Image (cartoon, rainbow, N blue to C red):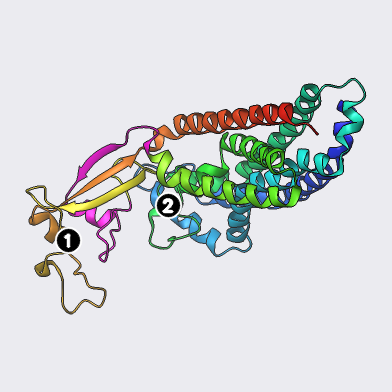
């Protein structure tokens, strides 16, 4: 039964291994040059006051050096998509196709119980799916390590990087593609596809259902679930230096950084006055009518003189691994529950 399961899985495995080898070759060719750019930037020997500037310089050179920005974004997208791909192409057909073609009859008539048949298929295919996804994540993490270090030193807070190199470890895309969370996502995606196939009993509809549910879960988790897994911290920042260093947007008055907390995940922020009441707009006296961008050079000092402060709710970057373990555990529990449903569903089936 084990050998037969591997034979059924060989096409998916060959495609996955070929893709991993191709990616490994690209990363192996470009990785040393990326590491040399990091070494030449002077970040390794920088002091506290100069690290942010050195990191910004490195990211600036990198942003202008093709194809690193494209590879960085494509790598993130590939890792995010991998669990969904596994769910729809590995999980959904696993039982549904057997039920459609009735190939399960051969196995069940040769002294193999339904429980053993399903346990072997789930264990071997699920472990292979998790191994492929985590291997992909680890390879990419090795390649992107210099970029992550530069972002962690504050280089992403420069105005030059509003997009590609501005995401810290707790950001939506970076968190989902690093650490151990890809293991949990892969297990959940595979189990979700398998459960959908067991319920619907047809591969194509099961694929569609898996894709929709997986997308909803992946969007809901960072927006509404993850921020509340650990009670957030709150702080009030003030002073001209904060309003200048945090690179606040004049239009939204939202903070982009937390003083003393590099890479912190800001959940909510907004200015308040000395009485603790929200400030809806910048005081007119702090704005220069002649300034083309709507703010005077001493905007921060002006706001500080009027007692305006910034209330920030955030998750510190030090909670990265606790979040990783909690979220991975949640998805593994969901995967186990879906696998249990598959056993229950198959046990009640009369086909």
Mark 1 or mark 2: which is in front? 1
Q: Between residues 195 and 275, which one lies in front from this camera angle?
A: 195
Label at residue 171? none
**Side of 146 where 17 appears, left or right:** right
Locate residue 229, reporting x and y percent. 40, 33
Which residues make up the magenta segment? 228-256
Residue 43, visible in the rendered structure: no
Label at residue 280? 1
Binning the other alpha carbons within 10 Å of mark 1 as few (below 14), some (14 to 19) or many (20 upward) gives few
304 relative to 316, above or below: below
Mark 1 → mark 2, Cα distance in angstroms: 30 Å
Locate residue 109, reporting x and y percent. 91, 26
Element on which disc 1 rests: loop
Q: Residue at x 44, y 55 (%)?
A: 56
31 relative to 319, above or below: below
Q: Between residues 214 and 342, which one lies in front from this camera angle?
A: 342
Q: Residue at x 22, y 73 (%)?
A: 294
Q: Quadrant of residue 137?
A: top right
């Amino acid at each position: 039964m084990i050998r037969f399961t591997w034979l059924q899985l060989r096409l998916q495995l060959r495609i996955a291994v070929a893709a991993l080898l191709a990616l490994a070759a690209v990363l192996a060719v470009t990785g040393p040059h990326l590491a040399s750019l990091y070494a030449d930037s002077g970040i390794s020997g920088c002091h506290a006051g100069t690290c942010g500037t050195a990191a910004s310089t490195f990211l600036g050179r990198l942003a202008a050096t093709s194809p690193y920005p494209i590879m960085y974004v494509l790598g993130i997208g590939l890792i995010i998509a991998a669990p969904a791909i596994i769910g729809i192409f590995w999980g959904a057909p696993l039982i549904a196709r057997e039920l459609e073609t009735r190939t399960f009859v051969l196995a069940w008539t040769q002294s193999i119980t339904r429980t053993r048949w399903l346990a072997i298929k789930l264990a071997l295919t699920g472990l292979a799916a998790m191994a492929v996804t985590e291997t992909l994540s680890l390879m990419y993490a090795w390649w992107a390590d210099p970029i992550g270090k530069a972002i962690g030193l504050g280089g992403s807070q420069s105005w030059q990087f509003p997009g590609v190199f501005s995401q810290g470890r707790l950001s939506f895309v970076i968190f989902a593609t690093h650490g151990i969370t890809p293991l949990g996502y892969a297990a959940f995606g595979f189990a979700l596809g398998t459960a959908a196939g067991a319920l619907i009993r047809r591969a194509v509809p099961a694929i569609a259902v898996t894709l929709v549910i997986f997308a909803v879960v992946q969007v809901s988790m960072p927006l509404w679930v993850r921020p509340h897994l650990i009670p957030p911290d709150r702080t009030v920042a003030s002073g001209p230096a904060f309003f200048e260093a945090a690179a606040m947007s004049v239009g939204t008055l939202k903070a982009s950084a937390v003083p003393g907390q590099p890479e912190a995940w800001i959940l909510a922020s907004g200015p308040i006055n000395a009485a603790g009441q929200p400030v809806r707009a910048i005081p007119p006296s702090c704005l220069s009518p002649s300034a083309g961008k709507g703010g005077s050079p001493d905007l921060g000092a002006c706001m500080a003189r009027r007692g305006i402060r910034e209330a920030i709710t955030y998750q510190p970057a030090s909670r990265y691994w606790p979040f990783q373990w909690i979220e991975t555990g949640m998805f593994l529990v969901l995967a186990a529950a879906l696998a249990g449903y598959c056993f229950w569903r198959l046990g009640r089936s009369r086909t």
